[in-house]
Structure formats: C-alpha cells, structure tokens
Amino acid sequence: MERVATGLFREAWPGRSQLSVAGLSCVLALPFGLAAQVGAAPLDEPIKPIPMVQELDPARTELGRRLFQDVRLSANDSVSCASCHQLASGGADQRAFSRGFSGRQALVNTPTVLNAGFNFRQFWDGRAGSLEAQIDAVIENPVEMGSTWQDVIDKVTAAPHYRTAFAAAYPDGVTQANIENAIATFERSLTTPNSRFDQYLRGDADALSAEEKAGYLKFKQYGCIACHQGVNIGGNMFQKFGVMGDYFQARGNPSEADLGRFRVTGDEADKNVFKVPSLRNVALTAPYFHDATAKTLEEAVDVMFKYQLGRVASEADMQSIIKFLETLTGERAGPQP
C-alpha cells in the first residue's frame, strides 16, 4: 500500500530496492570507520543511519559504472546517465531543468541518484517501482535519452569489452534486463554513509554541535519528521504539495508536471501529490522541489513551513534547522567515476 504524508524538499544526494543481486556476490565493505564512541549505544530515533556495508556483485557494479557514463545509451551518443546525475555535484546537475539528447529541457528538476536505492519508488511522481524500471523509462523517454532498447543492445553488443564483461557477469550476456540490472546495481552502490548525523545516531554525542542538536529537536517538534524519516530521511511515501495552502496558485503558471502522481493514476486525490524526497546531502543539491523554484535551503525551508506545516518559525529556529540539515551530508561510497 502506498504511504502518504507531508513535506517536499527536492531529493538529495536518486518499494525500497534490493541491496543484493543474483549471481556471485561479495560484501563490499565501505571505506569508512564507524564513528560511534567505543561502548556508546546507538540512538533510537525515527531517522536511521545508512548501513556501512552492502552486498553487491562487484562485476555487475563495475559494468554498471561504465554504462552509467556511456553516451551510447542515448539516441545520438550525446548524453549519458552521468550527464544529468553528476556524482561530484550531489548526484544531480545543479540546473533547474536538465537537458536531454536533443537539448530540450526536462519537465521537472532532476532528482539525485545518490541513495536512490533506498527510495520506495522512483521519479517525483513515483511511476517506477524500481531502479531498473526507472532506467527503462529514461532510455526511451523522447526528451531524455530518446533511444530504443534495440539500438542500445546493438551498440553495447558491438563493443568487445562489453561483450566480455556481460558474458562474465550474466549467463545470458547482453540483454535489456541485464543492462538495466547492471546500471541499477551501480546506482545501489551510490550511498553516502557516515554523515555527521549518522555518527551521532550511532552513538557519538560529540559529532554534532549544541546548535545542530537543537536544530534536530526543532525539526521534530515542528513536524518535519512526519515525512522525512527512515534511512533516507524521506523517499518512502507520497504527499500533496500544499497541504496547508495552495502553493501552485500562489506560484502561478501551472504546468502539466504540477499534477504529480495524478498523471500516473488519474485519481483526483493524487493531484499535486509527489514522492517525498530524501533530505540526505540536501545542502548540496539546490535548486529544490520538482519545479526548482527554491534556490536556497532558506527558501525551501520557508516554503515547507508555510505550505506543508501551516506554521511560522522564528528566524532563529529556521537557521537552527538548516544547521541540522547541513549535518546530513555524507561520504560517497561505491566505485568512483
């Protein structure tokens, strides 16, 4: 059953996806030491730390890493997954709207790919139930990649290094399903564990300053935690954008993309409903929201208070919450580009 709650930051450093895949698998120990103090007990909080260890097939992960950066997936060999999901820029591209293979703009702000494996569904409107389904949609999207699966398979098969790598990683070699799975496996490796807040959750009381701890308390007291919780601090439910006021009327210039989940279900109750995005690495992923209207964290937090919570926060409380949000920036795991 789909979950619905409140809050709509833009996705920060892209059903929960599986963290392991078929085939020979090994444990990839992430190169970060646990920050918790010796003997300190983890905190029991609604936000959970990102796991320090994942089980992912290394051959498939490496194959997916190469495909993620390969422009041959697009119709005219001009853009790759990495063109819009730049790992050095928070897993997005810092534009209001990314440009596809022909230079046309996307309809919504590009969500981050980092930690996307923890999302219960993919895309702002949740139309993809897995990372594999998300990849399928992007490949054939007339604005994004504009390709066909037959063309992609032909291009990949024509490359000797891909034929060899696929034969080693998958019994049936190059197929659509295997290309999707390889890229999705790489994307599942793109976690950002060991943020200072995760260190705090694991028991290191000194990982946060007094002001940052106060910001987390305010985050909970004001009600932000109702939507932004769990491992990904969001990404696990849907909610209407404008619970306590008509955001779209105030903004003006309504677009088809503003309809959100309604475009998937056709249900009137789903108008202006979106997947609640993750707040992980949110300090790195401006601009915010599906429409990219908030250029700074301050603007985004202000909109959330007004239209999602129906409350007014003092400037001191706002700044305190922002200080907390800045502790959610983690360390990039997985294979490097």
Image: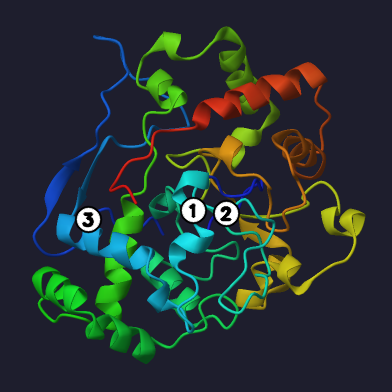
In this view, 140 is above or below 79: below
Q: Classify residue 29 as left or right of residue 230.
A: left
Which residue in the protein does label 3 denote?
A: 20
Q: Disc 2 vs disc 3: which is toward the camera?
A: 2
Q: Residue at x 86, y 54 (%)?
A: 246
Label 1 neighbourhood size at 10 Å, few (<14), some (14-19), many (20+)? some
User: Which residue is labeled 1 in the image?
Assistant: 86
Query: Would you say 178 lies left or right of 134 here?
Result: left
> Which residue does the image show at 59% across and 29% down from the upper left?
325
185 lies above or below 289:
below
- The residue depicted at 49 percent of the width and 57 percent of the height is 85
Q: Is residue 85 left or right of residue 70?
A: right
Q: Is residue 318 visible?
A: yes
Q: Which mark is residue 27?
A: none
- As shown in the figure, which amino acid type bears the numbered disc 3? Ser
Residue 137 lies, in percent from the top left, at: 48, 77
Query: Sequence order check: which comes first, mark 2 or mark 3?
Result: 3
Mark 2 → mark 3, Cα distance in angstroms: 28 Å
Q: Which residue is mark 2?
A: 93
Q: CA distance from mark 3 to mark 1?
A: 24 Å
Up/down of 226 relative to 190, above or below: above
Q: Secondary structure at mark 2?
A: loop
What residue type is disc 1 on?
Gln
Q: Are marks 2 and 1 in contact (CB under 8 Å)?
A: yes
